[in-house]
Structures are given as structure tokens and as C-alpha cells.
Amino acid sequence: MARGGFPGFGGNMGNLVRQAQKMQKEMEKVQEELKEKTVEASAGGGAITVVATGKKDIKEIIIKPEVVDPDDVEMLQDLVLAAVNEALRKADEMVSSEVGKITGGLGGIPGLF
């Protein structure tokens, strides 16, 4: 190993450690922000709306009264399921986007989220 650092890291070990510590602090901040940031998804042309946080907590499910048909509960269940899954997918996209801002595309690091 060459003197002054690891090859390919463009600097000494101290700089690498400082960069990692900075990234860790930024990640902690993003994790806290994601608890409050929300995404919204709907199904059935807006008949069902689901609001979820970046931490994948479902905060709200809104069901329009005209969608509630006692003779077709299965359709209502399907719409709720579709809206929830879409909200969770959007939450994943939001997390990936926020993490990507910090990691600069190194999002494949295991254990980040």
C-alpha cells in the first residue's frame, strides 16, 4: 500500500473518516426528516387515498362514501390494498431519492435503511 492512504480513495485515511462521519450525520438527519415527510397515493380514480410517511407508516386512509357498497366489499378491499401498495412504493422512491442526495449514487450500501 502506498504511503498516505488507500489507493483509489483520493486522499488520506483521515479525510475518508471525516467524509464518512459527515455522511453518517446527514443520514441521521434524513432519517428524522423521513418520519415527517409524506407521500400520497390513490386508487379507483381517487375513491381511496392513502398517506404514508418515508418510514412506511400509514398515516391516513380516506375512503369516499360512494365507494362503500355492502354488496361489493371485495372491490373496496382491492382498492384499499392497491392504494396502500402504491403509497409504500412512493415512500420507497422518496427514501431512495433522499439517500441518493447524500450518497451520490452509492445507494446500494447494505444497511443504510
Image (spheres, grey):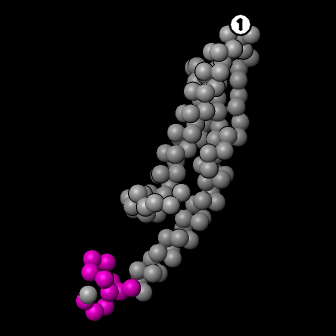
Count of number-bearing discs: 1
Measuring 42% from the left and 57% from the top, which residue is drawn there?
107
Please tell me in which quadrant of the rendered image residue 79 appears. Answer: top right
- Residue 48 is at least partly visible in this image: yes
Measuring 49% from the left and 70% from the top, which residue is drawn there?
23
Residue 66 at x, y = what percent?
71, 13
Instruction: Give the structural element (helix, strand or loop) at label 1.
Output: loop
Q: Closest to the observer: 85 or 64?
A: 85
Is residue 107 inside the magenta stretch?
no
Residue 6 at x, y = what percent?
31, 83
Measuring 48% from the left and 58% from the top, which residue is drawn there?
99
Q: Which residues are magenta?
A: 2-13
| Secondary structure character of the magenta stretch overall | loop
Residue 61 at x, y = what percent?
70, 31
Is residue 8 inside the magenta stretch?
yes
Vertical order, 74 against 95 (above or below): above
Measuring 71% from the left and 7% from the top, which residue is drawn there?
71
Vertical order, 21 against 100 (above or below): below
Image quarter where the N terminus lies is: bottom left
Furthest-bottom residue in this view: 3
Q: Which residue is mark 1?
A: 71
Vertical order, 90 against 34 (above or below): above
Vertical order, 11 against 89 (above or below): below
Q: Amino acid at mark 1?
A: Asp
Query: Left or right: where does residue 60 sit relative to residue 82?
Result: right
Residue 21 at x, y = what percent?
51, 76
- Residue 66 is at least partly visible in this image: no
Mark 1, Cα crowd under 10 Å, few <14 / some 14-19 / many 20+, is few
Q: Closest to the observer: 38 or 83?
A: 83
Please tell me in which quadrant of the rendered image residue 44 appears. Answer: top right
